[in-house]
Amino acid sequence: MAVNSISQVKQLMPDNVGLSGVNEEVKTPEISFGEYLNSALMKVTNLENEASKLKEDFALGKTDNIPEVLIAGEKASIALQFTMQIRNKILDAYSEIMRMQI
């Protein structure tokens, strides 16, 4: 059994993850949190629009690919559920901050 060096682990990690004990520059985000959130919401909207279009095409007989229609609907549903959970967490955090005493 060959033992690979630890330096190869760094190749597998994303660029924004730093290793403790290694001198690396901290990268600042290129976009603001608001822009990132807006982008994520637009992606959810696009998934919902795509699912609606596929459902409409299926209802009109333009497509007969049932798995594609179902998968698109599930992607949109999961993305919306995830977005709602993020919203709930943000509201919980806001409520907690507002309850803090100065």
Image (cartoon, grey):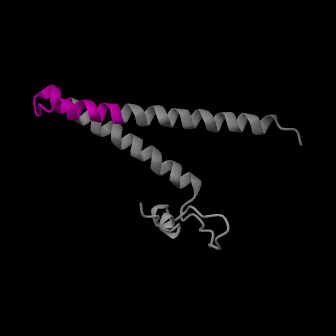
**Front in this rendered view, residue 71 or 84:** 71
**Front in this rendered view, residue 59 or 16:** 16
Q: Residue furthest front?
A: 1
> Which residue corresponds to the image point at 60% horizontal and 66% vertical from the top-left?
28
Residue 27 vs 41, above or below: the answer is: below
Q: Is residue 70 left or right of residue 16?
A: left
Residue 9 is covered by the magenta coloring: no
Residue 71 is covered by the magenta coloring: yes
Q: Which residues are magenta?
A: 56-75
Q: Which quadrant would the N terminus be assigned to in this image?
A: bottom left
Q: Is residue 43 left or right of residue 50?
A: right
Q: Which quadrant would the C terminus be assigned to in this image?
A: top right
Residue 76 vs 38, above or below: the answer is: above
Query: Where residue 52 sits: x, y (%)?
Result: 28, 33
Which image quadrant is residue 78 in?
A: top left
**Front in this rendered view, residue 71 or 39:** 71
